[in-house]
Each structure stands twice: as structure tokens, then as C-alpha cells.
Amino acid sequence: MTDSAAETPAEADDLWTTVDALHTWLNAGRPAGRDHETLLLRILKLSEEVGETAQAVIGATGQNPRKGTTHTWEQVQAELCDVAITALVALRTLTPEAEGVFLHHLTRVARRSLP
């Protein structure tokens, strides 16, 4: 994902508005009538983003002796954000009720995990 924060600032208050806008933007660039394929590819995109996160962690810790330290922890943070954004857009692709589905699930996880 490209960094266009200067053009379109996203704020926490409009997280789902931004997710919807990204969903709409991505849909505008895809061939018509390929909804199932689009969903599968957006879910698979998560694997790519998680891989980039792993690569950044390896680079930040210098675990590849051939390459040394190639990333910063700020780059790891950015990759984790890409994972979260990609997951939310994939969820929005699966259901127009993404916000409600997410909040319901978050509530369930919090109830079973927090004292």
C-alpha cells in the first residue's frame, strides 16, 4: 500500500469510512463479475503482508548474516499496519457489515481474555 497520508488523512474516528473508501477504490480497478476471485485474492494478500512483516523483523534484528540489519522497527510497525489494513479491507470485501462483525468479534475476544 502506498503512503498518501498527505493527500487523504485518516483518523481513528473514521477508520471504517477509510476502509470503505479503500474497498471502493480497489473495486473500481478490478474486472466486473469476479467477486469470488476478488475476495480470495484480498484474503491471500494478507499472506503477502505477513511475509513482508516477517522480512522486516528479520531485517530489524539482523538475523540474516549475509544482509545484516536491513530494516528498522518503524518499518516493522508500518508492515503491521499494512497487515491490519489489508485484513479490514478483506473483511469489508466479505461483508458490508464489516464494522459490526469486527466489533462483535473484538467484544467476544475481550470478554474471554480480559479479567
Image (spheres, helix red, strand yellow):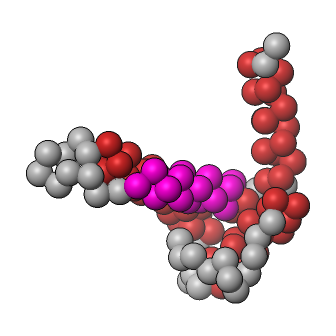
Q: Is residue 90 above or below residue 110?
A: below
Seen at 67% across and 77% down, the residue is: 5
Foreground residue among 114 and 47: 114
Where does residue 51 sit, x and y in percent of width and height?
38, 51
**Image side of residue 8 versus residue 40, left or right:** right
Q: Nearer the viewer, residue 2 or 43?
A: 2
Q: Position of residue 106 (x, y in %)?
A: 78, 35
Q: Please tell me which residue is depicted at 85% across the width and 37% down the height of the picture.
A: 104
The residue depicted at 63 percent of the width and 59 percent of the height is 85
Q: In the figure, residue 39 lies in which quadrant?
A: bottom right
User: Where is 94 relative to 21, above or below?
Assistant: above
Q: Residue 95, percent across and down?
A: 76, 56
Q: Residue at x 62, y 68 (%)?
A: 35
Q: Examine the structure image and report whether residue 10 is included in the region drawn in magenta.
A: no
Residue 50 visible: yes
> Which is nearer the eye, 73 or 13?
73
What stretch of residues is rendered in magenta?
A: 72-91
